[in-house]
């Protein structure tokens, strides 16, 4: 296929696919992205309940290439939250995050709709940087486990399919997207649901996306990450984890300065071993 990267996004989306729609962030997407397309196609291996009026549910295993091709056909946007979301045995990671990414991109390449993709990458792609270091989109990967390695792979897959076939992807190195920061490290890595939703809206609105790396974090005072390379998105996170500091201090002590949670950006993931199956 000829490269399509100079094509501008024309109008609103007809069908937006959310993979991993039963996961913790996938559920937030399901709840809050309904306005982005006429139809929302939700996918997971199980547990999606009943479809609402503008929803359609397609159960699919990312390891099944033919099923993923069917899943992607007809979608002009994809929020790819599906896959293994924490450290796990290699076989589990390989099926969901390695084979699954290949299947997704092959499906996108073959589809008739040239979907724009948001890939849920992770801070664990750079988790072995120390917390004293400041990163931007040009910082080399430094994964902190097999899960992090799979996210680096996913970003590479997105880059290749963009340069070869013009498929646009925003790889979002998501920090810690929860209602509130759960520990002191998350004062740096936290992203609020509101900021996350606004980021997704901007990614699907901007006329030309390209294939950026974006750090998914709120406007935290203690952030380690610089998003100046994606200023063109017009994304301005509003929340700041600092407002939770006092509450957090009342609940727990900060980790000792030589603890992985105080040394590495990826925190505990950096101290974890290989999970054997
Ligand atoms: C991730 O990639 C995980 O999916 C999530 O559960 C959190 O652990 C997050 O990173 C984090 O680093 O806080």
Image (cartoon, grey):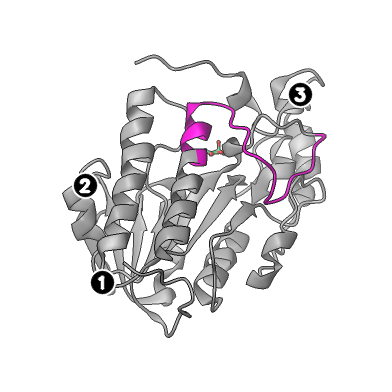
Give the camera-side residue of 184 and 226.
226
Q: Which mark is residue 65?
A: 2
Residue 149 lies within the magenta run: yes
Say whether residue 61 is left or right of residue 97: left
At mark 3, the secondary structure is loop
Residue 159 lies within the magenta run: no
Q: Disc 1 or 3, which lies upstream in sequence?
A: 1
Q: Disc 1 or 2, which lies upstream in sequence?
A: 2
Q: Quadrant of ligand 1?
A: top right
Q: Can residue 234 be seen from the camera position used here?
A: no
Residue at which label 1 appears: 112
Mark 3 or 2: in front is 2
Say whether residue 146 is left or right of residue 194: left
Give the camera-side residue of 109 and 234.
109
Instruction: Name which quarter of the figure residue 2 lies in.
Output: bottom left
At mark 1, the secondary structure is loop
Q: Can residue 69 be seen from the camera position used here?
A: yes
Q: Which mark is residue 255?
A: 3
Q: Residue at x 44, y 48 (%)?
A: 157
Q: Specify start and end residues of the magenta stretch as a single range.
A: 132-152
**Distance CA(mark 3)–CA(mark 2):** 44 Å
**Quadrant showing the C terminus:** top left
Q: Residue at x 68, y 44 (%)?
A: 189
Q: Which residue in the rendered view is the most extreme toward the bottom?
A: 11
Q: Which residue in the rendered view is the most extreme toward the front?
A: 2
Q: Which mark is residue 227?
A: none
Say whether residue 42 is left or right of residue 163: left
């Amino acid at each position: 296929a000829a490269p399509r990267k100079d094509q501008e996004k024309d109008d609103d989306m007809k069908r937006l696919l959310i993979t991993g729609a039963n996961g913790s962030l996938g559920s937030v997407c399901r709840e809050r992205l309904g306005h982005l397309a006429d139809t929302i196609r939700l996918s997971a291996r199980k547990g999606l309940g009943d479809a609402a009026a503008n929803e359609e549910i397609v159960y699919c295993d990312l390891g099944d290439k033919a099923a993923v091709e069917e899943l992607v056909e007809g979608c002009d946007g994809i929020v790819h939250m599906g896959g293994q979301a924490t450290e796990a045995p290699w076989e589990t990671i390989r099926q969901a995050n390695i084979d699954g990414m290949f299947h997704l991109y092959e499906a996108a390449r073959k589809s008739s709709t040239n979907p724009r993709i948001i890939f849920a990458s992770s801070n664990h792609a750079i988790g072995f940087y120390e917390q004293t270091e400041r990163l931007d989109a040009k910082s080399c990967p430094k994964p902190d486990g097999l899960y992090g390695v799979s996210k680096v792979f996913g970003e590479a897959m997105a880059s290749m399919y963009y340069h070869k076939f013009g498929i646009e992807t925003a790889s979002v190195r998501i920090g810690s997207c929860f209602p509130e920061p759960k520990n002191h490290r998350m004062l740096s890595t936290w992203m609020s649901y509101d900021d996350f939703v606004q980021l997704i809206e901007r990614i699907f609105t901007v006329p030309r996306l390209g294939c950026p790396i974006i750090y998914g974090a709120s406007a935290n005072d203690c952030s380690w990450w610089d998003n100046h390379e994606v200023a063109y998105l017009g994304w301005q996170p509003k929340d700041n984890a600092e407002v939770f500091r006092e509450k957090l201090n009342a609940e727990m002590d900060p980790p000792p300065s030589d603890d992985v949670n105080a040394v590495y950006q990826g925190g505990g993931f950096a101290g974890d071993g290989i999970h054997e199956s």
